[in-house]
Amino acid sequence: MNILQAQSVRQRTLKNAISYVGRGLHSACRVTMTIKPAEVDHGIVFVRKDVHGVDNRIPARWCNTVDTRLSTVVGNQDDIRVATVEHLMAAIYGCGIDNALIEIDGPEVPIVDGSAEPFVSLFEQTGTVQQDQPRKALRIHRPIRIEDDDKFMILLPSNIPHITVDIDFPNTAIGRQSYSLNLVRKNFQRQIAHARTFGFKQDLETLRARGLARGGSMQNAILVDGDEILNEGGLRSENEFVRHKVLDVVGDFALLGMPIYGHLVAYRPGHALNNRLLHQLMSKPGSWSLTTVDEMNHQPGLIHEPHPSLPTAEDAPELDDARDTKPEADKAATA
Ligand SMILES: [Zn+2]
């Protein structure tokens, strides 16, 4: 079977509107968020229902990112903002939704359980519908690289959307972890969506003193204290930490508004680096071209020449089938 057959070649939106009430991670503000179907080529747009008299629409686009220090924040020219969009955006991308209007009556997307799974469940319950326009795609032709100290990201040409992330937190319960997957079929839902955000106990007091992480708790984050995981239930999966970093990268790159046909390799990525790569990418129009998912599905060699070091979707149907390249000795630390 063509591994990309399940990728919709047409744009999609939600079948029906869905609502969610919850609190933001940093603001602790209780908000009601309603995600509605939208027409073709609309993209994902936030509307701050609690803001009046100025422009309250914020298209969820990479160029509207206004802060990346603790989460990804999008804003408009009137400085109306929505914070912590990345987990919701990852769920939207992972479920193949191109067009939606997101009404929200506060400054931050609810953190829910710290992962993208609750959003994915809502989208799957209501379902999506195919629309009457092709789904656009961005195809990488030449490598693009950025770095920041020892952190780096490279985007390489590939006929399938691939992602590889490495993280390294020495002397902690996290250690070094690596994860690689094809962003096709239901790989995101199965392997990435459940992974929760995480933080360190020693940082929590500092954040709280600055009025941040006010909505944070072990109900919506993994709390790490040195080589210990403080949450009673432990981890949801092996390498949950790096899976969450993949989730964040997917969410931040969803702000491009279309899938990238390229292999993204990231070493210690963060929201700032993710956004910088998008700026770098868009400033180099000779390195990519606009195409459609349909066009990419018909590329020769698509099925028979995947990247040799990467798994295919066929190989990795279940959560436990992690593509982790961490040495056996380190695994015990995060098991
Ligand atoms: Zn995150």
Image (cartoon, grey):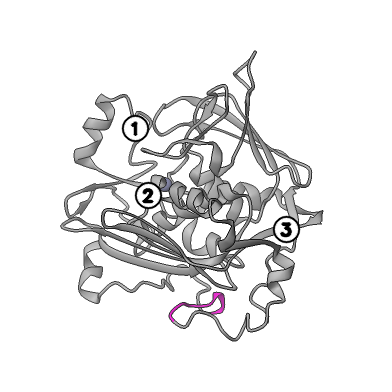
- State the residue lying farthest toward the bottom: 304
Disc 1 crowd, CA 10 A, few/some/many (<14, 14-19, 20+):
many
From the top left corner, tell me how far across and down residue 88 is, in percent. 54, 44
Magenta segment includes 310: yes
From the top left corner, tell me how far across and down residue 133 is, in percent. 81, 55
Magenta segment includes 271: no
- Tag 1 and tag 2, C-beta contact below 8 Å: no
Q: Secondary structure at mark 2?
A: loop
- Tell me, for residue 242, which label it has, or none: none
Residue pointed to by mark 2: 270
Three-letter amino acid code at disc 3? Answer: Arg
Q: Main secondary structure of the magenta part?
A: loop
Q: Is residue 10 left or right of residue 203?
A: right
Q: Is residue 313 left or right of residue 294?
A: left
Which quarter of the figure has residue 62? top right
- Marks 3 and 1, Cα distance to the nearest angstrom? 37 Å
Residue lying at 57% horizontally and 68% vertically, measured from the top left: 141
Residue lying at 33% horizontally and 74% vertically, measured from the top left: 325
Three-letter amino acid code at disc 1? Answer: Ala
Q: Is mark 1 within 8 Å of ligand 1?
A: no
- 42 and 62: which one is in front? 62
- Tell me, for residue 135, which label it has, or none: 3
Three-letter amino acid code at disc 2? Answer: Gly
Disc 2 crowd, CA 10 A, few/some/many (<14, 14-19, 20+):
many
Residue lying at 41% horizontally and 73% vertically, measured from the top left: 323
